[in-house]
Image: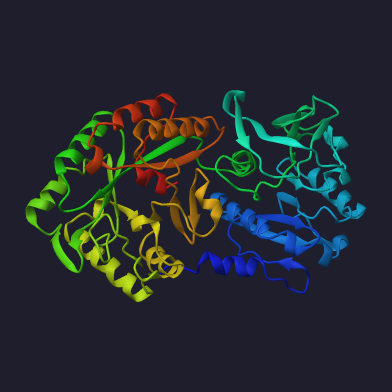
Amino acid sequence: MRHKAILCLFILLLTFVSDGFLLGIEKGTSTLILVNGDIGLQEPFVSRLVFLLASRFNETSVIVHLDKFSQSVLDLMAYNRIIYYGLDYRVSSLSMDLVNKINAWLKGGSSKIFLWIGYNGHRFDFEQWGFTVEEENKMHTGRLYYYGRDDRLIVFKIGNPDVFFVNILNPEQVKVEALIETNDGIKPIIVRGRALNDSWGRVIYIGYHPTAYVDKLSGLIPFTDLLHEVYVYPHNKKLLFLRLEDWHPLSDNSKFKSVVDYLVNQKFYYTLSLIPAYAQGDKILETIRTENIKENLYHLLKAPYASVVIHGYTHQLNGTTAIDYEFYDEKKDVYLSVEQTRKRVEKAIELVFGANLAGFIAGWETPHYKASPEAYQKVFEKEFTFIFEDCHQDSLCWYLPYYLKINKTGYLNTILGYVRQPLEEIINEIIVYAEILSNLRYAVEIGLFYHPDVFGLDYLPQLIEALKTQGWESISLFTLLNY
């Protein structure tokens, strides 16, 4: 029905074969990633880079371990992008033959882009591109300043103990993309260099390891933003997707309707998180098959603004709907089996499609985002092409403000979280976080969810107005899924 899980991709990517390659699955273009030194120091950081390129940019990675491969026979011409990821400070330099090949490859066309990340940048010939890299890592304060849209400086956190600064030789050849604060002042840490005959910089140096020390608003974000210049992406908008959480057959429809009416008046798109059956313990008390409940639901689905994600079958296992887990038994500390999960999902789908909601269904949302990896791979990702929650395949997912495609299933991270107590503090945190992300240069897609059953319309307008002022756009979830 669907296809192999992301784990299978990583097994292929991280299994050595005799010629030294780590093989990626062909799909569109490929990036050559060069690594060196102790493989124990490279993981999971190289795998995370592979995951990022595949899930965000649909890019296959071919990894060459230079210690296990003859650099003299390496053919670069099949690639438009090459990344050297320096994760082992003890390795020697690239062979001069390979350095010459990279320089010749860069001269072979204006579409060629070379990125050097991390250690040993001082061993490469960056002088012709207008800069050099300092040999020793230096102390820093943990603050990175990235030039976002309109050259606004955005502050990010750097937890990496080892960072490497750049010396600018010719300012006409170099664009500084990010700075880092040190005890000796501000130093360039991400730069783009160009040859004198180039119109734009095709050599990029990143003086830290962006897939290490990953955290909220860490160095991963400016790195990924910059990758939108390296790889083609279908839009360049700041998109916000609002999910109205936990509608079920016994919800207070008046609260949901007040929110929906406001959003439609504002021409703001929304996704209704639909629980099709209400239960306590093992007893189903109500479903959307009941005619008046079905009518209440229809009043909340205003075309073209509405979409729906199925939010479990009952959103409970032992307790009450919308409170309990559904695919995890909290008392026994075990996940439901794949077969148990499948049966509940099939019941949910039957109810939803029986209520003639097919035209509104965009995908799925797992109750409390908790189910076994096998449930995702063998049930959710087979039944749905979109899941409105943080992807679970890598910890990077928690921090990336992007729509990602994994196993041909789209995931949208609700990175802004949700309105809750303490209200004033949380709403301010959401607004501040969103403003930082709005100042990135390139495409961003983020999710936020809100509980009308709890708050009605009381706190949503001030949040929506603040986010619109920051430049966030609202589009149909179906438009996003068609990119």
Chosen colour scheme: rainbow
Instruction: Classify residue 381 as left or right of residue 110.
Output: left
Judge by depth and name the residue closer to the eye, 328 or 449: 328
Left or right: 421, with 264 as reference point: right
Q: Nearer the viewer, residue 259 or 482?
A: 259
Give above or below for 214 relative to 465: below
Does residue 40 lie above or below 429 as drawn? Answer: below
- Residue 246 rendering spot, x and y as whole percentages: 26, 50
What residue sits 92% from the left and 52% below the top?
Answer: 96
Residue 191 visible to the viewer: no
Residue in front for this viewpoint, 303 or 472: 472
Instruction: State whether residue 360 appears in this view.
Output: yes
Residue 52 image point, x, y percent: 59, 52
Image position of 268 (left or right of 391): left
Quadrant in which residue 456 is drawn: top left
Question: Extreme left residue here?
Answer: 292
The image shows a total of numbered marks equal to 0
312 sits to left or right of 394: left
Name the residue at 12% across, 47% down: 296
User: Where's residue 11, x and y in %?
Assistant: 61, 69
Q: Is residue 363 above or below residue 420?
A: below
Q: What percent of the width, then of the height, locates residue 249?
A: 16, 53
Rendered residue at 23%/67% (across/down): 347
What is the quadrant of the N terminus in the image?
Answer: bottom left
